[in-house]
Image (spheres, rainbow, N blue to C red):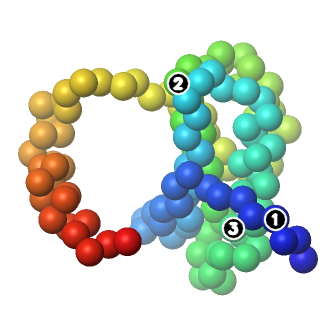
């Protein structure tokens, strides 16, 4: 047993797929070594966290940018369900999402007392 600690940026559960979803957030361009790290996370989740009735964990790597060819080669030999996507930073929330998310004040009230 190892005494080293590793931390996934975000860990969610997808109700319809019945699986854990590990999300690794990167502030720069995609690097091939991110796949190995995600494979490590997914193997650990499936072995230590996943319940018997759940499906295997899936991984999503979110990067500022990516080269499609590098991503394809990095994923070519992977046997784990991993996706790579990019994100875009915007200064205002898109109109179609404004009524679907709570206002900052509502979030602050929900977080009161949370340590």
Residue mark closest to the camera, 3 vs 1 = 1
In the rendered structure, find residue 64 and report the number of the disc placed on it.
2
Residue 50's label in the rendered image is none
Q: Are marks 3 and 1 in contact (CB under 8 Å)?
A: no
Q: Judge by depth and name the residue closer to the eye, 107 or 22.
A: 107
Residue 45 circle label: 3
Mark-to-mark CA distance, 3 and 1? 15 Å
Among numbered discs 2 and 1, the one appearing first in the sequence: 1
Tell me which residue sits at (58%, 34%) in the image.
26
Report whether residue 101 is seen.
yes
Position of the C terminus by quadrant: bottom left
Quarter of the rendering containing residue 63: top right
Determine the residue located farthest toward the bottom in the rendered image. Answer: 52
Image coordinates of residue 28 in percent, x first then y, are 59, 24
- Depicted 44 relative to depicted 53: above or below: above
Which residue in the structure is indicated by mark 1?
Answer: 4
Q: Are marks 3 and 2 in contact (CB under 8 Å)?
A: no
Task: Looking at this view, name the residue that lies furthest to the right.
Answer: 1
Q: Give the CA separation, mark 3 to mark 2.
A: 25 Å
Residue 17 seen: no
Q: CA distance from mark 2 to mark 1?
A: 28 Å
Q: Residue at x 59, y 75 (%)?
A: 54
Residue shown at the point (29%, 24%) measured from the top left:
90
Which SS class for mark 2? Answer: loop
Q: Is residue 68 left or right of residue 32?
A: left
- Foreground label between 2 and 1: 1
Q: Of callouts 3 and 1, which one flags the residue occurring earlier in the amino acid sequence?
A: 1
Badge 1 element? loop
């Amino acid at each position: 047993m190892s005494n080293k600690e590793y931390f996934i940026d975000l860990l969610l559960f997808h109700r319809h797929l019945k699986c854990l979803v590990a999300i690794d957030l990167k502030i720069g361009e995609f690097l091939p070594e991110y796949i190995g790290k995600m494979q490590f996370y997914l193997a650990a989740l499936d072995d230590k966290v996943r319940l018997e009735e759940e499906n295997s964990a899936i991984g999503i790597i979110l990067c500022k940018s990516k080269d499609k060819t590098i991503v394809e080669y990095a994923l070519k030999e992977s046997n784990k369900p991993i996706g790579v996507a990019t994100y875009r930073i915007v200064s205002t929330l898109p109109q179609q999402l404004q009524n679907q998310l709570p206002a900052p004040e509502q979030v602050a009230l929900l977080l009161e007392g949370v340590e």
